[in-house]
Image (cartoon, rainbow, N blue to C red):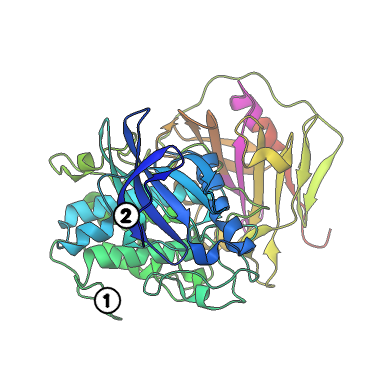
C-alpha cells in the first residue's frame, strides 16, 4: 500500500491502521497546524453502494451527535477515484488495544475506564443507536483541558435501532460480539452493546490473555460485587442482561463502591430469576433523549484514577434526594384529543400529538410489546431535536414485578446534569416518584417519573422534556392526564 502525499487539503504523514472496509491515515492540516485522522473507504469496496452508504452513515452520525465522548468528524470529501473519506479528530493517546498490549491496567484505573466507556455507549443508546462492535481497538484516548478523554470510535457497524433488526447483516468482532449478532434473524438492540461492555470488563479485570472461560479468573483487587455485574452483562439471553449502557454503568458504579455494595443490590449481582424490563430504544421509544451522558463510577477520596480520564462531568452519578422542585409556568392547556396504546391513554395538551403502539423491546406475558406512547408537539422530531417538548409514556407489568418506582427512576441517571431533590406527587390516583434534571447541553430539563397503577400490578413510566419554563405544575398536570383502563372495560 503506497502512502498518498495528500488527501484533499491534508498532507499525509503515515498510516495509522487498515481494516476490511477502510484505511486510516495521519494527516496534517497546514492551515490550522494540527493533526487529523483521515478514514478512507477501501478500494475493493468503492463500488459497493451498500458499503459506501454505511461508510458515509458513520460520518453523518458522528457529525450529528457531535459529543465529547465520541470521536468527532470535521469534514467529509471524495478522492479523485471517487472513494469517500472522513476527516476525524486525531486521538493521539492511541487505543485501549495498544495499552493492553503493554500489560494490564491497575484495577482501579480499569474500573474507571470501563465506566467511561459505558458512558460513551450510553450517548449512542440515548440517540437510538447501537454500536455493535465494542472492542479495545475502538476505544481511543485523547488529551483534553481537564485530562485524558475516553472516546468511543469506529461506528461503521452502528445502526439506528429502528433498522437494527433481523434485516441487518451479521456484524461484529468474535469474542466481543453478542450471541444474537451471529443470528441473521435475531433482533440486535442496546443489550447487544451491554454484552460488549461486559466482555470489555472481562478483558480489563479478568484473564490477562483476554480469553475468559465460563468461570474467569479475576485479578486481585477486583471488588467482590463486580464479577456479578459482568456475568449479568454477558448473559447469553438478552433478556437477562442490563437493558442498556446507562443501567450497566449504574450497576458497575454501585458494585465498585464498597459502601453501596454493602447496602446490597441483588439485582446487580446475578441474572434475575424471572422476567425483567428490556428498555430498548427504538423509533417507538427514544428513552433518554439526547441531552446528557452517563458518568464514570464514583471514586472515593484518595483514589486518583477518576482524574486520569478527565472528561467534564465524569464524577459520581447524580443521586436524587427527598425534597421539592420549584419554578412553574402553569399546566398544559386542555385539548380534546387522547393518545391510546392498549389500556394506556394520555389526554393531549393543546397542539400535541401522539404516536406509537408499543414499548420496543418490552414484552408482556402474552409475548406482545407492552403499551407505550410518545406525546409531543412533533412526535417524529422529539427524539432528536432538543427544542421539541414532549414525553414518552410506557406501561409495564414486567417492570412492576422487577422493581419499585423509586428503583426504576434510579436506574435512569443523567450524569453531567444537576439533579433536583426527589419528590412525590399523587395525580389521578397514582403515587408518582419524580426526579428532575437540569442539563448543560441538549435538553435543558429532563424529568423522570414512575408510579404503580391502582391495582399495583403495572408500572407507569413517564419521561418528560418540558417546554421552556415548564416546572412542577406543568409536570404534575401532564402526569394527571395519564390513564390506564381496567382490563375488561
State which quarter of the image contains the N terminus.
bottom left
Which numbered circle lies on residue 442? none
Q: Position of residue 126 (x, y in %)?
A: 53, 47
Q: Residue, x 31% and y 58% (percent of image)?
A: 264
Which numbered circle lies on residue 15? 2
The crowd level at tag 2 (other Cα within 10 Å; few <14, some 14-19, many 20+) is: some
Between disc 1 and disc 2, whose residue precedes?
A: 2
Above or below, 240 relative to 306: below
Above or below, 41 relative to 382: below
| Residue 473 shown left or right of residue 177 in the figure | right
Can residue 478 be spotted in the picture?
Answer: yes
The crowd level at tag 1 (other Cα within 10 Å; few <14, some 14-19, many 20+) is: some
Which residues are the magenta region?
Answer: 450-475
Q: Secondary structure at mark 2?
A: strand
Q: Secondary structure at mark 1?
A: loop
| Residue 256 shown left or right of residue 220 in the figure | right
Q: Nearer the viewer, residue 168 or 204?
A: 168
1 and 2 marks in contact (CB < 8 Å): no
Which numbered circle lies on residue 212? 1
Q: Is residue 363 magenta?
A: no
* Foreground tag (1 vs 2): 2
Q: Nearer the viewer, residue 170 or 375?
A: 170
State which quarter of the image contains the C terminus.
bottom right
Q: Residue, x 55% and y 78% (percent of image)?
A: 183
Q: Position of residue 8 (x, y in %)?
A: 46, 41
Q: Position of residue 331 (x, y in %)?
A: 70, 25
| Residue 405 shown left or right of residue 96 in the figure | right
Q: Residue, x 35% and y 70% (percent of image)?
A: 231
Q: Position of residue 185 (x, y in %)?
A: 62, 76
Name the outermost residue toward the right.
336
Q: Kindly report the distance in space between the C-alpha atoms of the residues bearing marks 1 and 2.
A: 32 Å
What is the quadrant of residue 27 in the picture?
Answer: top left
Amino acid at each position: 500500500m503506497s502512502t498518498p502525499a495528500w488527501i484533499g487539503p491534508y498532507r499525509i504523514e503515515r498510516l495509522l491502521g487498515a481494516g476490511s472496509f477502510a484505511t486510516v491515515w495521519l494527516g496534517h492540516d497546514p492551515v490550522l497546524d494540527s493533526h487529523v485522522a483521515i478514514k478512507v473507504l477501501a478500494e475493493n469496496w468503492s463500488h459497493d453502494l451498500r458499503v459506501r452508504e454505511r461508510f458515509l452513515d458513520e460520518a453523518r452520525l458522528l457529525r450529528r451527535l457531535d459529543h465529547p465522548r465520541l470521536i468527532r468528524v470535521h469534514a467529509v470529501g471524495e478522492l479523485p477515484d471517487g472513494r469517500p473519506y472522513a476527516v476525524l479528530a486525531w486521538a493521539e493517546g492511541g487505543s485501549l488495544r495498544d495499552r493492553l498490549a503493554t500489560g494490564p491496567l491497575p484495577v482501579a484505573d480499569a474500573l474507571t475506564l470501563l465506566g467511561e466507556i459505558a458512558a460513551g455507549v450510553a450517548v449512542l443508546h440515548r440517540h437510538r443507536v447501537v454500536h455493535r462492535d465494542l472492542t479495545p481497538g475502538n476505544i481511543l484516548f485523547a488529551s483534553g483541558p481537564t485530562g485524558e478523554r475516553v472516546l468511543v470510535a469506529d461506528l461503521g457497524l452502528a445502526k439506528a435501532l429502528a433498522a437494527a433488526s433481523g434485516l441487518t447483516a451479521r456484524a461484529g468482532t468474535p469474542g466481543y460480539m453478542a450471541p444474537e449478532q451471529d443470528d441473521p434473524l435475531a433482533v440486535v438492540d442496546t443489550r447487544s452493546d451491554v454484552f460488549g461492555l461486559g466482555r470489555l470488563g472481562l478483558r480489563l479485570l479478568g484473564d490477562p490473555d483476554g480469553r475468559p472461560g465460563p468461570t474467569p479468573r479475576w485479578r486481585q483487587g477486583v471488588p467482590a460485587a463486580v464479577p456479578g455485574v459482568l456475568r449479568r452483562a454477558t448473559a447469553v439471553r438478552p433478556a437477562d442482561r442490563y437493558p442498556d449502557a446507562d443501567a450497566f454503568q449504574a450497576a458497575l458504579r454501585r458494585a465498585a463502591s464498597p459502601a453501596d455494595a454493602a447496602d446490597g443490590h441483588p439485582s446487580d449481582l446475578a441474572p434475575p430469576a424471572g422476567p425483567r424490563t428490556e428498555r430498548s430504544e427504538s423509533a417507538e421509544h427514544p428513552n433518554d433523549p439526547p441531552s446528557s451522558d452517563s458518568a464514570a463510577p464514583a471514586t472515593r477520596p484518595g483514589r486518583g484514577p477518576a482524574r486520569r480520564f478527565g472528561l467534564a462531568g465524569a464524577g459520581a452519578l447524580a443521586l436524587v434526594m427527598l425534597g421539592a422542585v420549584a419554578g412553574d409556568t402553569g399546566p398544559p392547556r386542555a385539548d380534546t384529543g387522547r393518545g391510546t396504546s392498549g389500556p394506556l391513554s394520555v389526554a393531549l395538551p393543546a397542539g400535541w400529538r401522539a404516536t406509537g403502539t408499543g414499548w420496543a423491546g418490552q414484552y408482556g406475558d402474552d409475548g406482545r410489546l407492552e403499551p407505550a406512547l410518545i406525546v409531543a408537539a412533533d412526535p417524529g422530531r422529539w427524539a432528536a431535536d432538543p427544542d421539541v417538548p414532549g414525553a414518552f409514556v410506557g406501561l409495564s407489568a414486567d417492570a412492576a414485578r422487577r422493581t419499585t418506582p423509586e428503583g426504576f427512576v434510579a436506574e435512569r441517571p443523567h450524569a453531567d446534569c444537576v439533579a433536583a431533590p426527589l419528590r412525590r406527587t399523587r395525580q389521578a390516583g397514582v403515587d408518582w416518584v419524580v426526579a428532575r434534571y437540569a442539563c448543560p447541553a441538549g435538553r435543558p430539563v429532563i424529568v423522570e417519573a414512575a408510579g404503580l397503577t391502582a391495582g399495583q400490578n403495572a408500572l407507569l413510566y413517564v419521561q418528560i422534556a418540558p417546554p421552556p419554563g415548564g416546572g412542577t405544575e406543568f409536570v404534575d398536570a401532564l402526569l394527571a392526564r395519564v390513564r390506564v383502563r381496567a382490563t375488561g372495560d
